[in-house]
Image (cartoon, rainbow, N blue to C red):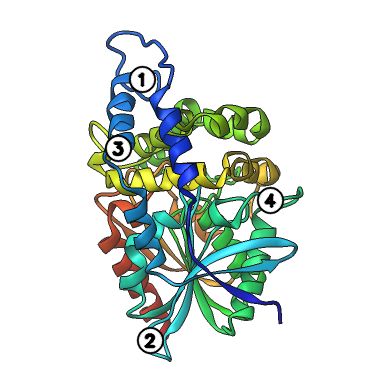
Amino acid sequence: MTDITPFRIDIPQSQLDDLHARLDRIRWPDELPGVGWEYGIPLGYVQELVEYWRHTYDWREQEKRLNSIPQFTTEIDGQNVHFLHLRSANPDALPLIATHGWPGSVIELLNVIEPLSEDFHVVVPSIPGYGFSGPTRETGWNVERVARAWAQLMNRLGYTRYGAHGSDWGSSITRELGRIDAEHVVGIHVTMIGTPPPPDAAPFTDEEQQRLKHGERYQRELFGYAAVQSTRPQTLAFALHDSPVGQLAWIVEKFKDWTDSADTPEDAVDRDQMLTDVMLYWLTGTAASSARLYRESAGSWGRQPEPSTTPTGVAVFPKDLSLTIRRFAEATNHITHWSEFDRGGHFPAMEEPDLLIGDIRRFFRGLSAA
């Protein structure tokens, strides 16, 4: 069996000193007056956030918190894979693999790991190319390949029967995992299913029309990052890899656009947790490799997915960037649980952890009862 090696985060002080030096000599862009967030993340907000990042934010405190959860690395399909693994006190608990998305990381799930460990053996891997899974070294790391790696990881951990949860890319990876490893996956829980309307879907209900309009706004106003990352991720990486403020702005804008926030992202997510997420991209130098997942997986966009018979739970949060329509999802998925919430957005583990934890528990308890 391939080795599983204990892992501990210990960032050299020289990297933190370099970050501080770069923050001290940032060259600020200009800005049009009165445009707010309409043209992108505002100058004033970034300046205030960078001031906090430089002089108040404490990486060592966040590093200590991360290291309080057991972490490991292993090699799968030629790629280093980093993961958090917190076993439940209940030896008979169901294993659960939970997958983040972009611009998330394992930080995205930090608030839910310990509560979920009351009911599950929790495994939270870093997607290849993200965080401490390090840059990918070859082409081909798409959603399906990641899902196959997760199946190997759970087998390597000795888990022959397990559940899975995911959001954003994690939703796609989780769905694919449930499809290709249906023999071992008892059920999957996701926050979105990318199922396009079939040609004969009309007429639409009023609610469906609203959800389609919500998706149209994403395509019209918010899709620019994906267009770049799915076509020219390497070109973008030169800016993000060299400028911590560039990396910060590229990520933090999404915490505003995709969350249930009013004025700033911090209406929805904790400032230090958001900065720690940015730090994982910066310290591991994974701006390019994380973006490559878009390039590798773009060929599947807009296509009807392969049918899945794995029991599926869906949690819909109203400010998510895409709102799943149930009858479209049911065409290719075995939906056994559906929840609609009145608050929350694209990062529910950060925004509304209690709602997410409760829904995951209800879904898997329902499977056990059935």
Residue under numbered circle 4: 136
Q: Amino acid at mark 1?
A: Glu
Q: Amino acid at mark 2?
A: Ala
Give the class, few, some or many, for how many residues have Cα within 10 Å of label 3's Cα (few <14, many ≥20). many
Residue 319 occupies quadrant = top left
Residue under numbered circle 1: 38
Chain-order first, disc 4 or disc 2: 4
Report the disc number at residue 231.
none
Q: Which sits in the foreground, 50 or 219? A: 50
Report the disc number at residue 369.
2
Instruction: State the separation of the CA atoms marked 3 and 2.
Output: 39 Å
Q: Position of residue 143 (x, y in %)?
A: 64, 55
Give the class, few, some or many, for how many residues have Cα within 10 Å of label 2's Cα (few <14, many ≥20). few
Instruction: State the separation of the CA atoms marked 1 and 2.
Output: 48 Å
Q: Is residue 238 visible?
A: yes
| Badge nearest the viewer, 1 or 2 | 1
240 lies left or right of 301:
left
Secondary structure of the residue carrying numbered label 2 = helix
At horizontal 31% and vertical 24% (from top left) the residue drawn is 47
Q: Position of residue 222 (x, y in %)?
A: 46, 30
The vertical placement of 155 against 281, above or below, is: below
Q: Amino acid at mark 4?
A: Thr
Residue under numbered circle 3: 265
The vertical placement of 153 against 131, above or below, is: below
Secondary structure of the residue carrying numbered label 3 = helix
Chain-order first, disc 4 or disc 1: 1
At horizontal 48% and vertical 60% (from top left) the residue drawn is 9
Instruction: State the separation of the CA atoms marked 4 and 2.
Output: 41 Å
Q: Amino acid at mark 3?
A: Pro
